[in-house]
Image (cartoon, grey):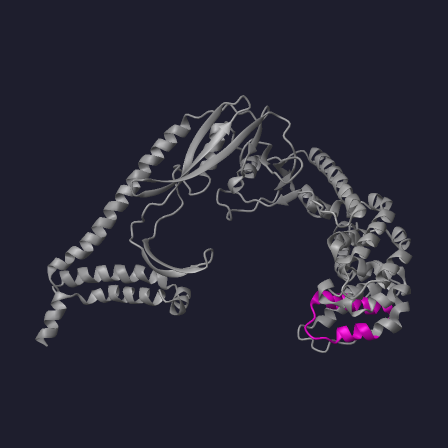
Amino acid sequence: MKGEEQVRRHFPISLVGLVVTGCVFALQAIPFTGIFLMFAMAMVWSVVLVNGSMIGVAIEAIMGRVSRLWLLLPLIFYGGYWTVAALEHSALRELSSLTDAANMQVMTGFDPAHHALVFERDENGNSAWLTNNFALAVAYTVKGNVPEGYLSKRMIERPLCVKLRETRELQSTNVQTSEFRDGEAFAYGPLETRFCNLSMPERPELPIVTVSRKETTDSEKSLPVTRITTTITMPDGRSFQLLGGVAAPLGWIPMPIIGCGLDSGAARWECGAWLSRNSHTPIVPGGTPYRQASNVLARALGLVPIAIEDRAGSDSAMVLANIARIQEATLARQLSNVDAMIADPTAKVTEWQIDVLVSRADALASHAGAVMTGIERAARLHLKARESGRILARLAAALPPGEFAELKSRLLSIYADAGNDHWLWEAEPLLRRLGDLGPDALPYLINPRASLPSVDGAAIEGLCRVGSSARVVAEPVLLALWAKPNLSYDLLNDLFVAMRRMGISPPPLVDDKRNLFVKLQADWENVSPSSPSRVCAAREERIAREQERIGGVRRHNLY
């Protein structure tokens, strides 16, 4: 008993925490056990274990269970840590003071009425944030992959936001809208319900003031610092620099991280020990951890803050006129690319988007014959022209009914010659539209290739478009698909509508745990053999009916 007491007096029992930390670290170093410990967050156990050990040693020493000399261990640990932390926070305060003093001297002479503000890189959405919160109607960012070379950022009113979002052909024009929130935090604060942000290709007309930034890693004594230098270059060549960045000082509570983890980038198991720091602490002083650098930039540019209630969107007529010009320019590029595909379906094309052309029935109809010629060329070349062929097939599928019907003999001819591995069986939009050519298309629509998951069961819509004259051939095919378990709700809609339009009464679902059959009946009770063929595109038809219900006008699924 006396020997055990003597051991306890020499070595604090609290040191067990350090021993456990070492054992856990050793187990983490072995990938087999380490992977389980990683998911158990073993890497941060050391925070509790090490601090618990130090506090426990101090308590044991104070209570006399061990020699008072053991107090030196926690005193050195915490005293040394807090000394370094205090020095780092002092260095951060000094750095912040110098940075703030330097930035206060910068006045650029920027004038929104006579200059265009252009960001070389739009870090943290600065361009849009400035237009939301200051008297700045528009800002720009450099965008190398659009012909204009720039994207403009401005605020527009909510009705125009809704209209633009519902205009599908804008998807290939780089015209985009986005919501934003008030306040300086990125993901918090009340949502602005009166306006949204608009981004679109647009070249600045006024003399350009460029904002660029450079990031370097440095240290102030032991304080890690990431310095960010923002350079404002005026049209006359004068430049001004704003200083900023983030530091990573130690916190006031020691947080030793000891452990291992998977480095997915290098595909190896790595171990280490370090002290956790308050990363991303802004160097620029401010009341919140967000947007200090943006506010410094706004002050240097002389931008006037605007209150939330005083916001005003850009002129809608001007915005729509700009978008119309973008659409026309995009249409011209898409037509040029399509002409190149038609001339040589194997040629490399730089832009594959055709959304604007698809939405322009007049331009598309005038190219119907040429598009069909391109499809025929691509069909003969098979795999060599697979991508171009599928794009041209999508254009053919978007043709108005009259122009599409004129291609009947040519379309059926290429499908008659297509083997089971041909790309024509991958042309989902064309397979869906093939039924508009009438019963002569049935041999190709009942081909199993036309109903594969890879084309999302396209033949279902195709058979539906043929109508009641396809019932004898289509009924066993549709019922066999209907009887399959675990079908998606979209596919069930397609099948239900197809059967109703052919005069087939859909039987109850075999396994209907979600009670979907009743919903299908309610949604499509008015579909009959006399319904227009456009109802066969059930997913698009649902959207179009909702448009009619809300606004009285159908903008999609016109045929």
In the image, residue 502 lies in the stretch drawn in magenta: yes
Q: Position of residue 94 (x, y in %)?
A: 31, 35
Quadrant location of the C terminus in the rendered image: bottom right
Residue closer to the observer: 383 or 216: 383
Residue at 22 percent across and 59 percent down: it is 54
Q: Is residue 310 above or below residue 451?
A: above
The magenta segment: 476-503
Q: Residue at x 76, y 73 (%)?
A: 481
Q: Quadrant of residue 158?
A: top right
Q: Which residue is farthest left?
A: 2
The residue lying at 46 percent from left, 58 percent from top is 264
Among the 4 quarters of the image, the one containing residue 21:
bottom left
Q: Seen in the image, is 337 located left or right of residue 190?
A: right
| Left or right, residue 390 beside residue 417 | left
Q: Is residue 532 visible?
A: no
Kindly give the residue lying farthest to the top in the view shown: 236
Q: Position of residue 456 (x, y in %)?
A: 73, 64
Relative to 213, residue 360 above or below? below
Residue 126 placement (x, y as % from top left): 53, 38
